[in-house]
Amino acid sequence: MLNEFDIFKDFLRHHHLRWTPQRKLILEVFIEQQGHIVIEDLHKKIHSQDPTIGIATLYRTMKLLVDAGLADMHTFNERTTYERLYKVRHHDHLICKVCGRTIEFEHPLIEKYQLEVCERHGFTLRSHRMELFGICNECRK
């Protein structure tokens, strides 16, 4: 069975790009993260292991990971985060407009209703993204 490293190597090879130690380290550190990670936080973790990897290299590599289908980029409240995609169950997001907290959730009726809507309109669903914005319990207090 393929893992994220195999998938990324194949993607790079297909696009005539090199598998470098920097890209390997970025992928290693990224897949260790849980949930959504801000690029600056990811850069701190990577920089502690290899101070030669700059933020521009990290941005370029994260774009490649998104293009390879291994990561997803979200912009919530003008803050960009990245999230691991490989072997992660589909979920949607609640985003606090005050503190930026992101809560992941799943609901079978949402999935059911969106399929019904697609069928009604003769539409073949490939993916979807639901982001609900509001104020979390902590910020409402």
Image: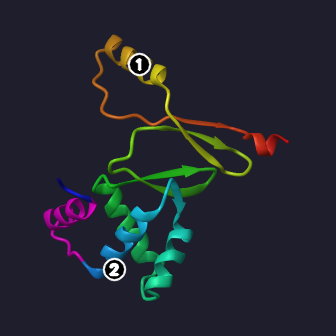
Q: Secondary structure at mark 1?
A: helix
Q: Nearer the viewer, residue 96 or 109?
A: 109
17 to the left or right of 73: left
Query: Mark 2 or mark 1, which has the lower sequence index?
Result: 2
> Which segment is the magenta one?
4-19
Vertical side of 69 occupied by 28: above or below = below
What's the residue type where badge 2 is placed?
Gln
What's the residue type where badge 1 is placed?
Lys
Q: Which residue is mark 2?
A: 22
Residue furthest toward the top?
120
Magenta highlight on residue 8: yes
Q: Residue at x 79, y 45 (%)?
A: 139
Q: Identify the image's colour scheme: rainbow, by chain, secondary structure or one colour.
A: rainbow
Disc 2 and disc 1 in contact, CB within 8 angstroms: no
1 to the left or right of 34: left
Hey, which quadrant is residue 118 in on the image?
A: top left
Q: Main secondary structure of the magenta part?
A: helix
Residue furthest toward the front?
1
Q: Which mark is residue 112?
A: 1
- In the image, residue 102 lies at what x, y percent? 60, 47
- What distance separates the C-alpha of mark 2 from that of mark 1? 42 Å
Counting labels gives: 2
Vertical side of 38 occupied by 21: above or below = below
Q: Quadrant of the C terminus?
A: top right
Q: Specify few, some or many for label 2: CA neighbours under 10 Å numbering under 14, 14-19, or 20 or more.
A: some
Q: Nearer the viewer, residue 89 or 122?
A: 89
Q: Nearer the viewer, residue 25 or 117?
A: 25
- In the image, residue 23 lies at what x, y percent? 32, 74
- In the image, residue 69 lies at what x, y percent? 30, 52
Q: Residue at x 30, y 56 (%)?
A: 67
- In the image, residue 43 lies at what x, y percent? 50, 74
Residue furthest toward the bottom?
52
